[in-house]
Image (spheres, rainbow, N blue to C red):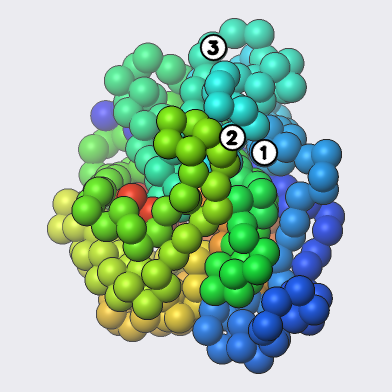
Amino acid sequence: MRRSAITATGSYLPKRILTNAELAKIVDTSDEWIVARSGIKQRHIAADDELTSDLATHAAKAALDMAGLKPDDIDLIVLATATPDETFPATATVVQKKLGMTQGFAFDIQAVCTGFLYALATADNFVKSGQVNRALVIGAETFSRILDWEDRTTCVLFADGAGAIILEAEEGEGTSDDRGILTSHLHSDGGKHDLLYVDGGPSSTQTTGYLRMEGREVFRHAVNNLASVVHEAMEATGLTTDDIDWLVPHQANKRIIDGTGRKLKLDPEKVVLTVDKHGNTSAASVPLALDEAVRDGRIKRGQLLLLEAMGGGFTWGSALVRW
């Protein structure tokens, strides 16, 4: 059976770090208030001249370096972002140019915080079908550009960054012992639009708009939806949560991550947590957390990883991966 294995990871965080103490000078908040409600202590903010494509390109280059590959060794780029450089063309094609990649194809996917899981599942299917042999999957955001910096309920949570992986075709036996993506599950519910959205866009207001969120409702749905989609992955493979070596969740809020972990009865030591340093980087958060855990040696060959995320739309999804 043809599988798509993750063979390399990369990430990039802008140099500017914005602490909770600095935010307290901008809006009515405090370090204690932010940490208690989200677990976030700091976040990275893109420089004025840094675009989403710049962040994505840095992360992509880091992944290529880890894999020992050149840009033209890649057949496909799928870039997940809710903050593209421009309305069109796709930011993925800008990254293609910046990498110096002269062949293959590239496109964007927009599923907000679940974007990386949607992009991963899409690229996985291209690889499994035999249409491509290598894919570069990126999650990149400059969420600071769509924040209302007078709204303390949102501006303290979100941030900028990028993460990337390389998928390569490998032959497996068709069992859960295979290396690669074992199963992925995606969902959406457009009826929850008003709980998490941006109040602008080319067709509606001809403006970029600002992020708006009903935090308590999002929290309630997030824990239930994420636990459900994890169980879905387990049922599809015949595995149990006891088999999971690492949960690599969307880094939205430590309380959501903790709540999901408790619902799944997972040991907190098995959860990769970066939200305290990165904030919520939307589509970039899962690959950012994954790259950190790969590079510091926590994630080892043969281990079972569960990736999950939920975002505006609502969208949510999971992927079960044998490293």
- Ranked by sequence position, the earlier of labels 1 and 2 is 1
| Whole-number angstrom distance, CA of label 1 to CA of label 3 | 21 Å
Asked if disc 1 and disc 2 are in contact, CB closer than 8 Å, the reply is yes
Q: Quadrant of residue 35?
A: bottom right
Image position, residue 322 (x, y; %): 40, 50
Q: Secondary structure at mark 2?
A: loop
Image position, residue 8 (x, y; %): 60, 40
Q: Give the residue number, with chain letter if any, for mark 3.
A: 104
CA neighbours of label 3 inside 10 A, class few (<14), some (14 to 19), many (20+): some
- Ranked by sequence position, the earlier of labels 3 and 2 is 2
Q: Give the residue number, with chain letter if any, for mark 2.
A: 84
Q: Give the residue number, with chain letter if any, for mark 1.
A: 52
Question: In front: mark 3 or mark 2?
Answer: 2
Q: Is residue 247 left or right of residue 1?
A: right
CA neighbours of label 1 inside 10 A, class few (<14), some (14 to 19), many (20+): many
- Of 104 and 133, nearer the camera is 104
Image position, residue 152 (x, y; %): 60, 74
Q: Using the rendered image of the protein, determine whether residue 152 is visible from the camera's viewpoint.
A: yes
Kindly give the residue lying farthest to the front in the view shown: 205
- Kind of residue at badge 1: Thr
Q: Secondary structure at mark 3?
A: loop
